[in-house]
Image: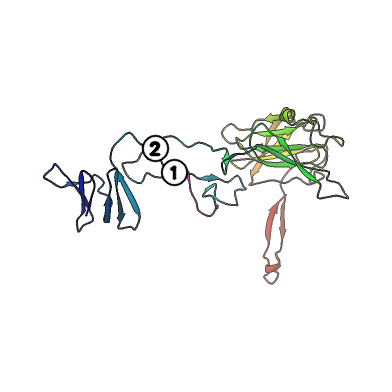
Amino acid sequence: MATSNSLLWAVDIFGRVYTLSTTGQYWELCKDGELEFKRVSAVKQCCWGIACDHQVYVYVHSNDVRIRYQEETYENQLLPSDRWQWSDVSGLKHQKLESFVLPSPHWEWESDWYVDENFGGDPTEKGIWYREDVCYHNPEGSSWTLVATPGEAVQISCGPYDLVWATLWEGQAIVRHGIDRNNPHGKSSFWSQKRLSWTVVESPVQDNGILHISVGVNVVWAVTKDRKVWFRRGVNSHNPCGTSWIEMVGEMMMVNVGLNDQGVTPSELSGKTWKVIACSRDSDRSQTGSSTSLLR
């Protein structure tokens, strides 16, 4: 039993909470009948209680002051074989948007989900980091330079010469212009202008954005979120964006282009067919016929 300035609070043997007004004659059952309580402690503004689930709850009288609690989940922009798409901050607990439910009928959603572009209270910088001074004699380079992008980049692929493509969180691809031996990170040397050195390439399908990009010498391949494989027509050093997408046969989780466009020829940049590569695993050498297959 507990008291506040105008109410007496009590818990019966069934865990139900009642209040008795100082001006009233009858005990009134609290509206929230879904919880069973063990103990309560009241003050003027609210009543605290320990429920049978050993959780602490607070009951607040109706007024104009709202109690707000922020739910959060994290989207992992990784390969489909890695973590869940939605998880807690550690990445270990699966937290889909649909899994969040109100704790009781007294709560209501104040707004829809939104993207928080701050991390640890500080705004996050959108862009791709370029490593300066990487060469044969200095493979680790010297420092990182931020190259701004027109959106949040989640994956990047560069060819052996002058092709650099990246994918955006929204599902488009972006292409870097002006890359050459003297200007390896693009044609603009000013941070404020580097954003202008990207061209956005839309996904081949409107409802499924680009998930993965792979770049070679004169070829660009992509996988969309529905696992369809696409080849970019017309890509070369003079036109790094290409002209159009061509859908290829098969479904993949990701693709990877060899350094010299292995498997294709200058006259057949998209290749002709997929070839299964079968090879034995070390653990299967003692088992006749055991193999694992890859597609090329």
Residue beneath the point at 72% across and 44% down: 273
Q: Nearer the viewer, residue 22 or 268?
A: 22
Viewer-side label of 2, 1: 2
Amino acid under disc 2? Trp
Q: Which percent across, then down, holds residue 251?
A: 63, 44
Is 77 placed left or right of 134 in the picture? left
Q: Work out whether mark 2 precedes mark 1 in sequence or the reverse, and give the earlier one.
A: 1
Q: Is residue 40 visible?
A: yes
Residue beneath the point at 83% across and 43% down: 133
The correct choice, above or below, for 196 with respect to 15 in the image is: above
Our reading of the magenta stretch's main secondary structure is loop
Q: Residue furthest front?
A: 5
Q: Which residue is mark 2?
A: 109
Amino acid under disc 1? Glu
Q: Which percent across, then down, holds residue 295?
A: 70, 51
SS for callout 2: loop
Point out which mark residue 98 bears. Answer: 1
Tell me where the magenta segment starts and ends, as one range.
90-102
